Image (cartoon, grey):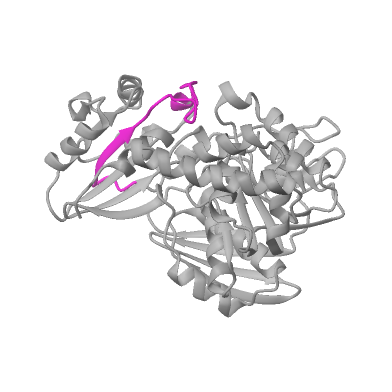
């Protein structure tokens, strides 16, 4: 009875905290109420499962969490189910508490929960709440100051899985580290058998990649490698290889969309995904695989894919003062290099990089990312954010003409500069880090 009272009181506190921060601050309030609730009642999340009538789903991985979880949520909602989802990407413990605390009420429940979880915080979330599904997208080197080496991140996720042995896993078979997470009672794999490109995507451009050793300590080799370490790997010594996929796919990547043919139980399904790049084809395959696991059909899934809008900053298309603008978050070597392969070199480019905690303070990733792709850019490149000078130096060494680099550390002023450097009808590309993206999103930009 006391726990229930504290839970209901937490709901009131959350709403008061959210109202206060929205009234007196410009913050989006994606974590503040959750922080207050966690301090008042640390076991708050343990009660939330009672308000989910069907299944609760978590999504984790280095890249693609926000898009994949957004796709899953959108597909389920379009099947006329009520979903609670941390849409704005606050994926640490207090951010996840925040979304439950502001949406639940004593007489309101949801059919599904779709929760994006930071890799390092997943185990903390599972300390308080059991989930039914975990989708893992990939594991790349990311924010060394927070996560350390990639093996450390893998151990965070493995530790989380060990706390929830009944969890059903949906795993990327093409990632040699993710595929080893198959330790629960039930797991399914998704992956690509073949990928073709019908676009200006540079498939031959190098991507940062990790060298993984098999459990027998021999280096893995590849029959096919799609990007980074994603592909068809095998161990020449002991015979270990990429697992057979339950959801096996072939993709054709176009400039603005992808065609994906998925085979499951010897039945083929064709899908069109209106998202840019191979990395988003992987995100879509993960979401579609999970949707099939939930019992949704091809028509329901495709209908949702047709109306899906990119999550903010994830291949997000906007019009800014008559300029067609594509905003793509960059935050680590593999993700940045894949985005850079898709950049329109005829567009005016803004790169805005901060080094706040949420971005990662270690900027070494700039040097591991393939900024050489921008050396043939035809228009000005504006660099902004707290690490604008670092980006300018990186572009210089990437071969970009320094006369084409404009340094403007103030992000708001950099938007003005990019508009001055372009005209109505031109294309703009914005490549921000996470907190720079939040800053841009708060600006009142005219269409």
Residue at position x 62%, y 45% from top?
A: 9
Q: Is residue 7 above or below residue 285?
A: above
Q: Is residue 210 above or below residue 16?
A: above
* In-image side of 170 versus 66 (left or right): right
Instruction: Look at the image and give the residue range highlighted in magenta.
Output: 343-367
- Residue 195 % position (x, y): 56, 58
Can you see residue 12? yes
* In-image side of 88 versus 442 (left or right): right
* In-image side of 447 versus 106 (left or right): left
Q: Which image quarter holds the C terminus?
A: bottom left
Q: Is residue 308 above or below residue 35?
A: below
- Residue 149 % position (x, y): 65, 25
Can you see residue 63? no
Residue at position x 43%, y 24% from top?
A: 355
Q: Nearer the viewer, residue 437 or 216?
A: 437
Type of secondary structure dominating the magenta stretch: loop
Residue 365 located within the stretch drawn in magenta: yes
């Amino acid at each position: 009875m006391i726990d229930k009272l504290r839970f209901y009181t937490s709901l009131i506190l959350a709403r008061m905290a959210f109202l206060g921060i929205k009234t007196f601050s410009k913050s989006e309030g994606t974590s503040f109420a959750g922080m207050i609730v966690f301090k008042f009642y640390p076991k708050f999340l343990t009660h939330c499962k009672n308000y989910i009538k069907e299944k609760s789903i978590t999504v984790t991985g280095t890249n693609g969490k926000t898009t994949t979880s957004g796709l899953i949520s959108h597909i389920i909602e379009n099947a006329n189910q009520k979903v609670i989802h941390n849409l704005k990407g606050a994926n640490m413990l207090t951010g996840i508490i925040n979304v439950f605390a502001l949406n639940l009420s004593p007489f309101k429940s949801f059919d599904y929960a779709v929760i994006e979880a930071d890799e390092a915080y997943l185990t903390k979330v599972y300390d308080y709440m059991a989930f039914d599904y975990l989708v893992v997208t990939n594991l790349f080197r990311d924010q060394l100051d927070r996560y350390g080496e990639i093996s450390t991140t893998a151990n965070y996720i493995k530790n989380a899985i060990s706390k929830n042995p009944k969890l059903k896993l949906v795993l990327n078979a093409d990632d040699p580290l993710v595929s080893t997470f198959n330790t629960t009672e039930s797991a399914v794999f998704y992956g690509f058998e073949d990928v073709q490109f019908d676009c200006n995507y540079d498939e031959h451009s190098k991507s940062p990649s990790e060298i993984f050793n098999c459990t027998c300590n021999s280096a893995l080799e590849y029959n096919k490698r799609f990007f980074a370490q994603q592909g068809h790997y095998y161990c020449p010594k002991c015979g270990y290889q990429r697992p057979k996929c339950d959801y096996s796919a072939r993709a054709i990547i176009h400039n603005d969309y992808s065609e994906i043919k998925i085979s499951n139980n010897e039945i083929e399904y064709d899908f069109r995904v209106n998202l840019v790049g191979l990395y988003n084809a992987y995100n879509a395959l993960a979401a579609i695989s999970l949707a099939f696991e939930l019992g949704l059909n091809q028509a329901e899934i495709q209908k949702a894919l047709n109306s899906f809008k990119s999550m903010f900053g994830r291949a997000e298309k906007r019009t800014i003062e008559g300029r067609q603008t594509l905003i793509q978050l960059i935050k680590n070597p593999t993700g940045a290099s894949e985005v850079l392969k898709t950049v329109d070199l005829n567009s005016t480019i803004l790169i805005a990089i901060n080094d706040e905690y949420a971005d990662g303070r270690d900027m070494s990733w700039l040097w591991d990312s393939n900024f050489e792709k921008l050396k043939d850019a035809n228009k000005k490149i504006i660099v902004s954010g707290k690490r604008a000078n670092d980006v300018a130096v990186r572009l210089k060494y990437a071969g970009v003409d320094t006369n084409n680099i404009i340094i403007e550390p103030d992000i708001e002023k950099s938007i003005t500069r990019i508009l001055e450097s372009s005209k109505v009808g031109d294309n703009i590309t914005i490549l921000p880090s996470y907190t720079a993206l939040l800053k841009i999103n708060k600006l009142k930009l005219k269409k």
